[in-house]
Image (tube, helix red, strand yellow):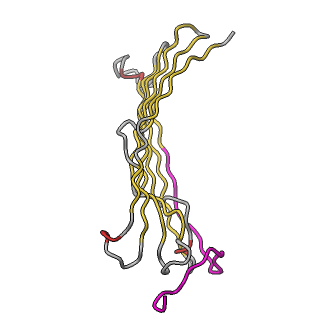
Amino acid sequence: YLVYEIVSQANSTADAFINGFEWSWRQSFRPFAILPAWFRAFQVYANATYLRPGGPGKDDLSGYSPRTLNYGVSYTKPRYVVKVNVASSEGTRTASVAQSAVGTYTGFSPRNLVAAALEFRFYKTLVLHMSAQNLTNTQFRRMTYVRGAPVYTRPEVHRDQGVDYVIGVRGEY
């Protein structure tokens, strides 16, 4: 360990900050009378977050994704609702690796998660709902980044989450 500066789990004494911005947009087509009736049942949305760390302690910040984008579409009728959503993340730096070379940290690689949901109203008081998360079965990849090390030497853990399904009935009485 003569060549390495050792990092511990102590809090950083260097100042750090995060600047960024968020935006969101939602559009319902219901108010547009010129459109066909079936098309007015659609609604689209998108939102994003952009974060940029700064300061001398910026390399010690973790637990956030610097860029995220979420978007989706829904189709709503009196008896049913169908939704599809996509959540994109640039990746998340989760933690510095204690007792390793400076600049070594773990994190999740970038990923896109697709989800869908369906609700069907049998009666005003009885609803069947179904949803599926991670429809494309995207793997969660946890990686260890070492500054200056070639990509092929970085350890990775691939976790196959599968698709999560939820089916339920909601009722009021």
In the current view of this chain or complex, which residue is farthest to the bottom? 2
Tell me the quarter of the picture where residue 110 sits.
bottom left
Query: What kind of secondary structure does the magenta stretch mostly adopt?
Result: loop
- For the point 53% across and 59% down, the residue is 64
In the current view of this chain or complex, which residue is farthest to the top? 123
- For the point 62% across and 14% down, the residue is 171
Taking depth in this image into account, of 118 and 135 the one nearest to the observer is 135
Taking depth in this image into account, of 120 and 26 the one nearest to the observer is 120
Position above or below: 48 against 103:
above
In the current view of this chain or complex, which residue is farthest to the front? 1
Q: How many numbered discs sit on the rendered protein?
A: 0
Position above or below: 94 against 85:
below
Is 63 one of the magenta-colored residues? no
In percent of width and height, residue 94 lies at 52, 62
In percent of width and height, residue 23 lies at 50, 50
In percent of width and height, residue 62 lies at 55, 65
Taking depth in this image into account, of 95 and 114 the one nearest to the observer is 95
Q: Is residue 36 left or right of residue 2?
A: left
Position above or below: 62 against 4:
above
In percent of width and height, residue 6 lies at 54, 83
Q: Is residue 170 left or right of residue 101?
A: right
Quadrant where the image shows the C terminus: top right
Position above or below: 6 against 42:
below
Taking depth in this image into account, of 108 and 156 the one nearest to the observer is 156
In the current view of this chain or complex, which residue is farthest to the right? 173
Q: Which residues are magenta?
A: 1-24
